[in-house]
Image: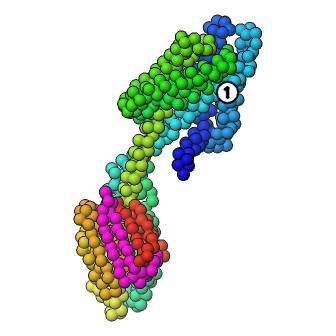
Amino acid sequence: MGVRATTLPTITLLRGLWESLGYASSLSQQVALWFLPLGVAGPLFLDRARLGGSLIEWIVIALDAQVSLMVAFEIARRVIHRKDPEGSRPYATLVAIVIACLLRGAVIALLADNAELSSSIELAYRLVGGVTTVASMIIVICLVIRERDVHRELVAALDSRLASLAILSISMQGRLAEINRGIGERVAAKMGPLVEHLDRTLDEALSGADVTASVEYIGHVIDDVLRPFSHELVNDRQDPDLLVADGPPVAGRPKARLGSMQLGGAIFPKICAAMVILVAVAPAARELSALGCVVFLLGMGLWVLVILGCLRRLVGGMRVPVSVGIVVITVATAVTLSSGVVIMMSANLPVPKYVLIPAGIVGALLGSLTSTSHALRERRRVTEAHLLSAVEELELSVSKLRQEAWIGRRRASYILHGAMQSSLYAAILRLSSNPRPDEALIADIRRDISAAMAKFSQAAEPPAALRDGLAETADLWSDACDVRWSLSIDAECLVRTSSTGAECVAEIVREGVGNAVRHGGAASVAVAVDSKVDRVVIVIEDNGRGSEFGGQLGLGSRMLDEMCVSWKRESTDQGTRLTAELAV
């Protein structure tokens, strides 16, 4: 088990790196440009010192080789990622990198031979160097480039969420008003034509026509329109456009926002030692014996491991600005490699010729790559935490809007069931009792219906205190069930600042208890209302049979989806437990 526990994270890390290598950015021109300093250093400081020739000749050779690498990258990128530009193709990408590096080495060998700078094209040396030195460094560059791109995507997502949150916060009241206005317009569009038609039938009754037509029409409105419409208001999800707050698109590339970095954590002795050994294989194998090659590679690897390890311990958890940290680690790694070459030469140990300056360049590139990668990973964790917080806050705000939309539709449904239905029933009774209505009676009917319609545009009355609502629910079912409830002081204080939140809590408790009794046959229900940060947590436990929450199939689930940030229903040994969290 111990081996498994330590191996799995390593395997997961390697799989992540392998996937990161396969993206199109690994074959981009940015990777080739990052490699340019090392790509030019070899021909200028190693080959020129060995083979002679002018500085201009070797600059031209080095740049031609760099161009061949860039062309190979561009062709490979277009071929490999033509169908799936955003996908990862690590195997094909690795093969393309190796082929491009071999092509670069072959170009240097052929150009040096063509310029009569070498009696042999040294193709084997160039190809070995292309695979060990060039390909290994390019792979490291690819991984850092991918890390940067992922961080930029996270920053862009964070910017978008923060912009959405700002827009939603600024326009919250306007959105609430728009939601309520939309509900009122929906009711008016549905009921307005019916009321106009009813007006005409009342005019006909006033003119002496039989009131039966008016009575039948009012009955049709109640049974076939009003009741289904009131259920539709509660059940249907509305206002999706009003609940979504899209932030403005981010102009240009998002900034990295690197801030500061931990200096010690950005030094990687083992990785740098391994990379130094890989990079040094080609020049060591060209000039040294087998034993000398082993001594040089192990000596340089051990030197880098020890010096960078000591430096890592020395600076420890010191935090510095990212730009300063990258410069410090770049210089420190370059000095470490160069000093290793000098010390081995001073100790008369085997060292390839002309590697002092390239060693410094390799060290600088390794230091900049490892420190940049660490800074990006460190800031990525911070950005992910900020993004998670922003998404959660946005979800809370949207949940509050959904609560308002639900309560708004619920209020409209209550008006349809209550005032509107009562006024229409009263109209039926009046007309049935007065087959020949006079103007006063018709005026009374119209006034009652107009008053009911006016309620849709009036401000809702403030709901009763949550404690009173819980007590009312318990009293309502006291004859059929033992309902016990508790309301924590923190939760009561929290809902006191939000009438909508209090109304939603009361509604969930009312429906939950009613459902447990009516459909679950519960004889005992326990309701607990508590708080957690800026949320109210409702737990309803009963000893009845588990069933769908709400009177109609799916009604309870839809209500919970719209009102709650999260909720779950589960069976227990005693019965059923419903847990719901509401944003307040």
Depicted 59 relative to depicted 582: above or below: above
In depth, the one of 494 and 6 nearer the eye is 6
In the picture of the structure, the residue carrying the numbered disc 1 is 131
* Residue drawn at the location 40% of the way across and 25% of the way down: 324
Quadrant showing the C terminus:
bottom left
* Residue drawn at the location 47% of the way across and 42% of the way down: 154
* Residue drawn at the location 49% of the way across and 30% of the way down: 268
The answer to whether one can see residue 51 in this image is yes
Q: Position of residue 120 (x, y in %)?
A: 76, 13
Q: How many marks?
A: 1
Q: Secondary structure at mark 1?
A: helix
Magenta stretch in the rendered image = 519-548
In depth, the one of 523 and 82 nearer the eye is 523
Depicted 334 relative to depicted 186: above or below: above
Which amino acid, by three-letter code, is at mark 1? Val
Q: Position of residue 326 (x, y in %)?
A: 44, 26
Residue 146 located left or right of residue 411: right
* Residue drawn at the location 43% of the way across and 76% of the way down: 573
In depth, the one of 510 and 247 nearer the eye is 510
Q: Position of residue 199 (x, y in %)?
A: 37, 79
User: How packed is label 1: few (under 14 Cα within 10 Å), some, or many (20 or more)?
Assistant: many
The answer to whether one can see residue 39 in this image is no
